[in-house]
Image (cartoon, grey):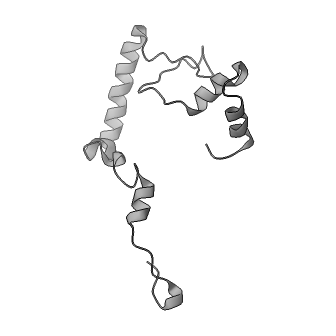
């Protein structure tokens, strides 16, 4: 989340009862799977992914998702699933430091 009045409020009130839940929702790590009943929980605050009663729906959704990922040759399934764990996705700062500087057009170089 970029700097904004909302982020400033969340950070300032993160230890108070009125802001703690909002802060957690915005900045905590997400669980590996999420599943919400949008009719009963339109704000998506109650994750049902670990509920045994939803195992059939989760399995069906996972099968459908994998089918789409394979059909569209998504790199998360076609490149061994590690493409986004590597630079530049995992450490853009390191990649930027390793990249040679672009030639300056002021000294007669050509831009890349």
Left or right? Give the position of 108 relative to 59. right
> Residue at the location (41% across, 52% down)?
91
Residue 74 seen in the figure: no
Task: Indicate the position of residue 76 as horizontal and vertical percent values.
Answer: 33, 42
Among the 4 quarters of the image, the one containing residue 15: top right
Report the quarter where the C terminus lies.
bottom left
Give the residue displayed 38% in from the left and 65% down from the top.
Answer: 98
Which of the pair 91/53 is nearer the observer?
91
Residue at image position (53%, 30%) is 28
At a point 32% along the width and 47% down the height, the residue shown is 75
Q: For this rendering, which residue is in front, 75 or 18?
A: 18
The reply, left or right, for residue 61 in relation to residue 42 is left
Q: Please, is residue 35 above or below residue 78 in the view?
A: above
Front-lying residue, 79 or 73: 79
> Looking at the rendering, in which quadrant would you find the N terminus?
top right
**Residue 60, position in %: x, y?**
36, 22
* Relative to 29, residue 88 above or below: below
In the rendering, at what x and y percent does residue 69 appear? 34, 39
Residue 104 vertical placement versus 37 (above, below): below
Compare residues 71 and 23 and report the one nearer the observer: 23
């Amino acid at each position: 989340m970029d700097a904004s009045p909302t982020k400033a409020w969340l950070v300032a009130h993160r230890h108070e009862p009125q802001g703690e839940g909002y802060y957690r929702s915005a900045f905590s790590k997400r669980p590996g799977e999420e599943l919400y009943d949008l009719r009963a929980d339109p704000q998506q605050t109650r994750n049902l992914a670990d509920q045994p009663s939803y195992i059939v729906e989760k399995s069906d959704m996972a099968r459908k998702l994998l089918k789409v990922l394979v059909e569209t040759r998504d790199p998360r399934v076609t490149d061994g699933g590690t493409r986004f764990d590597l630079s530049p996705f995992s450490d853009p700062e390191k990649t930027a430091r390793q990249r040679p500087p672009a030639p300056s057009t002021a000294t007669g170089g050509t831009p890349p």
